[in-house]
Amino acid sequence: MVMDTYANRLIDALGGSTKVATLINAPLSTVHSWRRIGIPKSRLDHVKLAAKAARLRVDWDNPPPSRREVAPTQQGAAA
């Protein structure tokens, strides 16, 4: 399964799929699907506004690595 790295990083930086879904009053399945397909621009704008209202701080241009990303040292061991 191909994952959207930016979406994963951003969702995790905001506290995870459940927290983002609650934050924007959207179904969990919708937010979870963004991990795979990416966050649509209109929804990203909504997430930004909701995060600002909730006083959540995140680097929108460069969110920290997601816990779902495989560390480089583990890639070689998994092969």
Image (cartoon, rainbow, N blue to C red):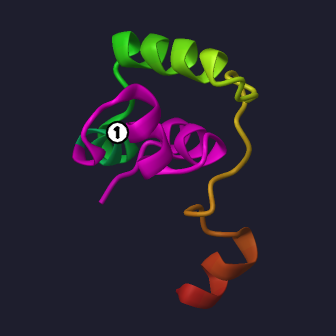
Q: Residue at x 53, y 42 (%)?
A: 11
Left or right of residue 72, residue 27 in this image:
left
Residue 68 as seen in the image, left or right of residue 65: left
Place of residue 37 in the rendered image (x, y in percent of width and height, measured from the top left): 30, 38
Q: Which is more toward the observer, 22 or 77?
A: 22
Which is nearer the eye, 2 or 63? 63
- Three-letter code for the amino acid on which mark 1 is drawn: Trp
CA neighbours of label 1 inside 10 A, class few (<14), some (14 to 19), many (20+) = some
Q: Residue at x 58, y 37 (%)?
A: 10
Q: Position of residue 56 (x, y in %)?
A: 70, 29
Nearest the viewer among 12 and 25 is: 25
**Residue 70 position by quadrant:** bottom right
- Under circle 1, the secondary element is helix
Q: Left of 65 or right of it: where is 12?
A: left
Q: In this picture, is 73 found above or below 54?
A: below
Side (left or right) of 39 relative to 5? left
Asked if residue 3 lies in the magenta stretch, the reply is yes
Image quadrant where residue 22 sits: top left
Main SS, magenta region, reads helix
Q: Is residue 47 magenta?
A: no
Q: Which residue is mark 1?
A: 34
How many circles with numbers are drawn on the protein? 1
Residue 55 location, x and y as percent? 72, 23
x and y percentages locating residue 4 in the rendered image: 43, 42
Work out which quarter of the rendered image holds the N terminus and state it.
bottom left
Which residue is drawn at the image coordinates 55% and 36% (left, top)?
6
**Residue drawn where x is 34% and y is 39% of the image:** 34
Give the magenta part as a residue range: 1-29
